[in-house]
Image: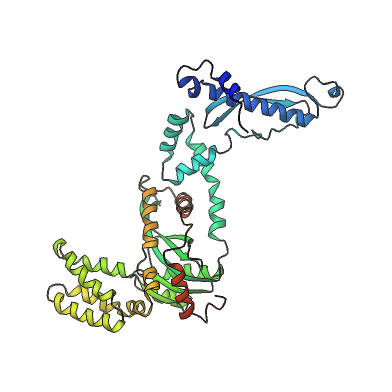
Amino acid sequence: MAIPTEVLDQLIAGYKKPEDLIGENGLLKQLTKALLERAMQVEMTDHLGYRRNALEGKNSGNSRNGSYRKKLKGDFGEIDIAVPRDRNGFFEPIIVPKGESRFKGFDNKIISMYARGMTTRDIQSHLEEIYGVEVSPALISQVTEAVVEEVRLWQNRPLVEVYPIVYLDAVRVGVRHNGQIIKKAVYLAIAVTMTGVKEVLGMWAAETEGAKFWLSILTELKNRGVKDILIACVDGLKGFPEAIEAAYPATQVQLCIVHLVRHSLKFVSWKQRKEMADDLKGIYSAATAEQAEANLAAFEGKWDVTHPKVSQSWRNNWQRVIPYFAYPPEIRRVIYTTNAIESLNMSLRKVTKNRGSFPNDEAMFKLLYLALTNIAKRWTMPIKNWKSALNQLCIMFDDRLPEF
């Protein structure tokens, strides 16, 4: 509802400087206080069923009984408001609920700042500087604590039966354990759904990254309803492919090409990197597995004299590389790298770097969940060329995608 111009003109008649409107005791704050108190008086009238001093209120069994003071925090800063009460003690205002000391939406601002990696001290300083509100560390902890149950429900939610592609990886996070800080592995599983949109299936923590723990994660996914994964994209962790195949025997395990390339380039000087990268591209961009192997042989002839470890790495992982060449370009572009999950890991590192470490796993999961939720808001569109890739997947895995 638009406010009449004459009302606005009357309100700002004495306006001389910005502080008169938005300052500590400015018009905006006074107006917020007046509107809240007026709204609660209207609610009281509705509760009692008669207006103040109305005749029908006589001997009605309930009446107004003054008010009590209450401090309310919000975007406007902190204000003192008078909350009306009735003689029977049943009145509870809706606009400022009983027991609430923060205006609706204020908690969301705290959670939003927390999700972006701001520390408790940062949030305190920001709220005081921007809104003039003093917030205790205990309050911030109390607000974010409400997320813990949300995390539990999210982690145990049912999943769909089939995911065409799942990326699996881990990120390291500092957590206090038995009086010292250790780097825990936080395991992440990101799926590409049948509509081509990314979805985080879950996160788990352990002191080390190992195939045995990955097997327990995959078993959990199975228990939550995932019956089939067409392609699993992973890094080069020893025993990882075998763990996936133990849980999902029909799943095609694809080693991340970018992981292999990065590992290879560690063996050469900066000056030689571009030349080697171009030669490696000749391997993984080949049209067929046969051509790729021929290009690998040529690579060995050129580089093995000085850098034999590079081709050895490719040979050792060759059986996990060659499935890639059986796919058409549309699918290759999707599984070429675990960039989808590495990009997520990078975003998570940004929100954890200010903290140094977490006091416990619960605090770590709380922040990571909020950060993941924040990041996932941007995942609204299918990945590039998904329809073409899905068409190819339906042809290649027709017996496992009957409804498509």
Left or right: 268 with respect to 57? left
* Quarter of the image where the N terminus is located: top right
Foreground pick, 109 / 178: 109
Residue sitting at x 52%, y 15%: 14
* Quarter of the image where the C terminus is located: bottom right
Rendered location of residue 101, percent (x, y): 59, 32
Residue sitting at x 55%, y 71%: 161
Left or right: 82 with respect to 235? right
Q: Of all residues shown, which one is farthest toward the front? A: 5
Q: Of all residues shown, which one is farthest toward the top? A: 14
Q: Of all residues shown, which one is farthest toward the right? A: 59
Residue sitting at x 49%, y 57%: 380
Q: How is the image coloured?
A: rainbow
Q: Of all residues shown, which one is farthest toward the left? A: 305
Count of numbered tags: 0
Left or right: 33 with respect to 334? right
Residue sitting at x 51%, y 21%: 26
Can the viewer see residue 321? yes
Rendered location of residue 97, percent (x, y): 65, 35
Foreground pick, 346 / 392: 392
Quarter holding residue 93:
top right
Rendered location of residue 246, percent (x, y): 46, 77
Rendered location of residue 178, percent (x, y): 40, 52
Can the viewer see residue 215? no
